[in-house]
Image (cartoon, rainbow, N blue to C red):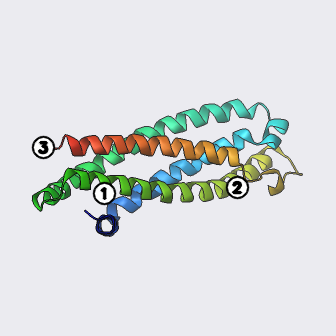
């Protein structure tokens, strides 16, 4: 099939399944916003300087948050794929090849990755700024302003790598569901 037609099917699928896909994307984005916030606060030099005892707790919280994120996202993805089995069966009945369906799943995953990445990084920075000011208020620091919380590219890359690994795992899972779906 032509790529343009497959892209049209992907867009149409996002519109028709919006009641499932939009909450999935928003939930994943919020989880990775928190992930970015924890990573950036943990790597912040001002926090390390002023509140060095806080960093190990942030690292532990980040680990558990990542673990819960992976579990939740795999569960939600499994639910989404079980909803889509009928759609894939109809596509096969209409003559679409498994190769075309795999390409649709790859395109959907890439689109979801881009949307989730943008929302997670932008929202994570804003959430991190609020969290940074909240921590400084609790610690009684009068001097701390947002200039001590710059945008952290290392935290961004770490978060993007985690998102990419997760989306890659979801892609492999979704493709395996397609390959072994004989019903």
The reply to whether residue 90 is in sight is yes
Looking at the image, the residue that sits furthest to the right is: 143
Please state the horizontal and vertical placement of residue 142, each as a whole percent of the image: 88, 51
Q: Residue at x 85, y 51 (%)?
A: 144
Q: Which residue is mark 1?
A: 104
Q: Nearer the viewer, mark 3 or mark 2?
A: 3
Q: Quick one: 144 or 35, which is closer to the camera?
A: 35
Residue 104 drawn above or below residue 73: below
Is residue 137 shown left or right of residue 16? right
Circle 1 — which element? helix
Q: Which residue is mark 2?
A: 130
Q: Residues within 10 Å of mark 3 (few under 14, many from 20)?
A: few
**Quadrant of the rendered image containing residue 110:** bottom left
Q: Residues within 10 Å of mark 2 (few under 14, many from 20)?
A: some
Between disc 1 and disc 2, whose residue precedes?
A: 1
Looking at the image, the residue that sits furthest to the front is: 2
Q: Which residue is mark 3?
A: 182
Residue 141 drawn above or below residue 18: above
Please state the horizontal and vertical placement of residue 138, each as a whole percent of the image: 77, 46
């Amino acid at each position: 099939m032509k790529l343009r037609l497959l892209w049209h099917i992907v867009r149409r699928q996002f519109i028709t399944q919006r009641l499932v896909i939009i909450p999935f994307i928003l939930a994943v984005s919020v989880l990775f916003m928190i992930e970015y916030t924890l990573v950036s606060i943990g790597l912040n030099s001002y926090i390390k300087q002023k509140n060095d005892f806080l960093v190990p707790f942030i690292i532990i919280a980040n680990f558990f948050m990542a673990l819960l994120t992976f579990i939740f996202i795999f569960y939600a993805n499994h639910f989404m794929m079980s909803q889509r089995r009928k759609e894939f069966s109809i596509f096969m009945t209409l003559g679409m090849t498994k190769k075309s369906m795999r390409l649709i799943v790859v395109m959907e995953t890439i689109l979801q990755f881009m949307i989730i990445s943008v929302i997670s990084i932008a929202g994570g920075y804003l959430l991190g700024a609020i969290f940074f000011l909240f921590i400084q208020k609790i610690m009684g620091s009068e001097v701390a302003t947002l200039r001590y919380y710059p945008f952290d590219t290392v935290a961004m890359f770490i978060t993007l790598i985690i998102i990419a690994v997760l989306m890659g795992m979801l892609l492999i899972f979704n493709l395996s569901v397609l390959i072994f779906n004989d019903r």
